[in-house]
């Protein structure tokens, strides 16, 4: 049974005014924390009105010090004795401010809400294990909480991001805005700066191995690595002596480099492929091959760093037509990452790109090489290569071994 009722009208006159709000707030905070309503509470710099209100409450001056100190036991006694709140201070504050939920219960409820918000992420990791490591990292590093702030917002954000990630990589490549409209119902849903774009791009990069970076060009390349394009003409690939379209045939006849856009590859892909295509990382190799060998150079594709959507589309097409690939890149950690990314899309064999080749290049170059920097990376096609890079700690760019590469490219 409940005790005698609180006289709310008298209570609000006595304790509900603005000048005692600090006291009511302190009591409520103690109730939320499960602390006893005993001892004293103090206000460091009280106004005269706050002192006067405390004096009216207690029926005497609370003290002459600079701080205003009120004993909770005394307030409780006044409320009980006066009949305003026969059950004391707890009932009075609850009447004034509403039911008190202990902070521990609040935290437990919020934790449960957050666990439920992550359900979409958990299902993604279960259904597509290649997303599992990213899902754990996103949960642990607080990215979702920073982007969403509340469990309800996080639930919607994760549901949208997971819908995007379940569709990646997109093959053949598509317009980012069209994809967003199809998957999320808005062509602008994946615009830069939106929470879902930030989260989905993080997952896309984890899927494709696209390196860290910043800026609009980097984001464009990161989306493109998963087959999503800002447009179909800015993504390009550089080639030499490929054939299979009128434009490629004409350029191969004169031995000049050819720049292909993703749009060209989507609408007019090569119809034929040579048995072997050499692939390099840097345009200097392709340019030198065109200068030295011209139309007699072996077919060559340059990925120009991390492979673009156009480069991946071209290589996939050539692979479908039966071409085999020989790859060479810079001997540094970035070069190893590029090679690993490429191997996730098409098979290739190393072209003077092994530990033995690196050691030979270091020995031939002498003291002119730059120190190797950056975060180490593996070399799955030749694990000894990564060990050799760590041992010598020297960077060998493709230009340093250009003579031997050009020998291989002579038709």
Image (tube, helix red, strand yellow):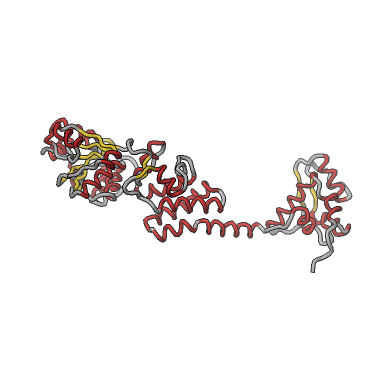
The N terminus - image quarter: bottom right
Q: Is residue 404 left or right of residue 180?
A: left
Q: Is residue 108 above or below residue 215?
A: below
Residue in view at x 21 percent, y 42 percent: 270
Q: Nearer the viewer, residue 13 or 368?
A: 13
Q: Return the x and y of residue 388 as percentages of the image width and height.
A: 24, 47
Q: Nearer the viewer, residue 345 or 281?
A: 345
Residue in view at x 52 percent, y 51 percent: 154
Tell which residue pokes out farthest to the bottom in this image: 1
Q: Quadrant of residue 38?
A: bottom right
Q: Is residue 59 left or right of residue 124?
A: right
Tell which residue pokes out farthest to the top in this image: 291
The C terminus - image quarter: top left
Residue in view at x 38 percent, y 47 percent: 205
Residue 163 shows in the view = yes
Q: Return the x and y of residue 389 as percentages of the image width and height.
A: 26, 45
Q: Return the x and y of residue 244 as percentages of the image width and height.
A: 18, 41
Q: Is residue 40 left or right of residue 306?
A: right
Marks counted in the figure total 0
Q: Quadrant of residue 245?
A: top left
Residue in view at x 13 percent, y 36 percent: 297
Q: Return the x and y of residue 178 as percentages of the image width and height.
A: 40, 44
Residue 382 shows in the view = no
């Amino acid at each position: 049974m409940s005790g005698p009722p609180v006289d709310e009208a008298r209570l609000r006159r006595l304790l509900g005014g603005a000048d005692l709000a600090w006291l009511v707030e302190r009591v409520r905070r103690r109730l939320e924390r499960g602390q006893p309503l005993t001892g004293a509470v103090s206000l460091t710099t009280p106004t005269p009105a706050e002192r006067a209100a405390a004096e009216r409450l207690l029926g005497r001056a609370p003290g002459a010090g600079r701080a205003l100190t009120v004993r909770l036991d005394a307030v409780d006694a006044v409320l009980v004795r006066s009949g305003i709140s026969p059950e004391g201070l707890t009932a009075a504050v609850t009447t004034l401010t509403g039911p008190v939920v202990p902070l521990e219960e609040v935290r437990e409820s919020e934790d449960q809400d957050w666990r439920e918000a992550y359900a979409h992420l958990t299902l993604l990791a279960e259904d597509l294990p290649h997303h599992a490591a990213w899902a754990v990292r996103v949960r642990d590093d607080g990215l979702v909480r920073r982007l969403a702030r509340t469990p309800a917002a996080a639930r919607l954000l994760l549901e949208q991001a997971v819908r995007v990630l379940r569709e990646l990589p997109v093959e053949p490549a598509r317009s980012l805005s069209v994809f967003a409209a199809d998957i999320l119902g808005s062509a602008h849903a994946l615009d830069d700066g939106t929470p879902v774009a930030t989260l989905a791009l993080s997952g896309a990069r984890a899927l494709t191995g696209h390196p860290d970076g910043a800026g609009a060009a980097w984001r464009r390349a990161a989306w493109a690595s998963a087959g999503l394009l800002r447009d179909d003409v800015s993504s390009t690939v550089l080639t030499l002596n490929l054939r299979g379209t009128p434009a490629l045939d004409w350029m191969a006849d004169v031995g000049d480099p050819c720049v292909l856009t993703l749009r060209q590859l989507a609408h007019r892909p090569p119809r034929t492929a040579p048995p072997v295509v050499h692939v390099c990382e840097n345009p200097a190799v392709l340019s030198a091959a065109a200068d030295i060998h011209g139309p007699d150079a072996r077919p060559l594709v340059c990925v120009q760093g991390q492979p673009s959507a156009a480069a991946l589309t071209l290589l996939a097409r050539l692979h479908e037509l039966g071409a085999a690939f020989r790859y060479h890149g810079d001997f540094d950690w970035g070069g190893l990452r590029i090679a690993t990314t490429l191997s996730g899309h098409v098979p290739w064999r190393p072209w003077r790109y092994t530990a033995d080749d690196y050691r030979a290049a270091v020995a031939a170059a002498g003291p002119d090489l730059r120190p190797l920097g950056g975060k180490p990376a593996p070399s799955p096609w030749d694990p000894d290569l990564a060990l050799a890079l760590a041992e010598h700690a020297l960077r060998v760019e493709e230009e340093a071994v250009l003579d031997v590469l050009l020998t291989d490219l002579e038709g």
